[in-house]
Amino acid sequence: MLVLKANTEQYNALNYYENNGNILEFVKDGNDNWIVGMNVLTAECFYEIWNELSKLETIEFIQNE
């Protein structure tokens, strides 16, 4: 499964972004990366930050053990 990975600067700028009660929240994967699902790229509620979201790196999800 593909996910979006944020570096520290991107995470600090985007985490907990809120629009009409919808909150963008990153989680840690098994490699200690800040990740979020690909669906945020098509979610209307995050359209205002789409340019920033589209700059996140696409990686393969690594499950926590």
Image (cartoon, helix red, strand yellow):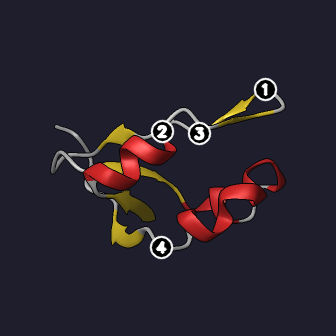
Q: Amino acid at mark 2?
A: Asn
SS class of the residue under badge 1? loop
Residue at the spot 55% in from the left edge and 64% down from the top edge: 52
Residue at the spot 45% in from the left edge and 46% down from the top edge: 13
The numbered dot on residue 47 is: none
- Label 4 to label 3: alpha-carbon separation: 15 Å
Residue 8 shown left or right of residue 38 in the figure: left
Residue 8 shown left or right of residue 36 in the figure: left
Total numbered labels: 4
Q: Crowding near pointer 4: few (<14 within 10 Å), some, many (20+)?
A: few
Q: Is residue 19 above or below residue 47?
A: above
Q: Which residue is mark 1?
A: 21
Q: Is residue 1 visible?
A: no
Q: Amino acid at mark 3?
A: Leu
Q: Which residue is mark 4?
A: 55
- Labelled pair 1, 4 in contact (Cβ < 8 Å): no
Q: Is residue 57 visible?
A: yes
Q: Which residue is mark 3?
A: 24
- Residue 57 picture quarter: bottom left
Q: Which quadrant: the N terminus?
A: bottom left
Give the mark, 4 or 3, whose residue is nearer the N terminus: 3
- Label 2 to label 4: alpha-carbon separation: 14 Å
Q: Which residue is mark 2?
A: 15
- Residue 6 picture quarter: bottom left
SS class of the residue under badge 2? loop
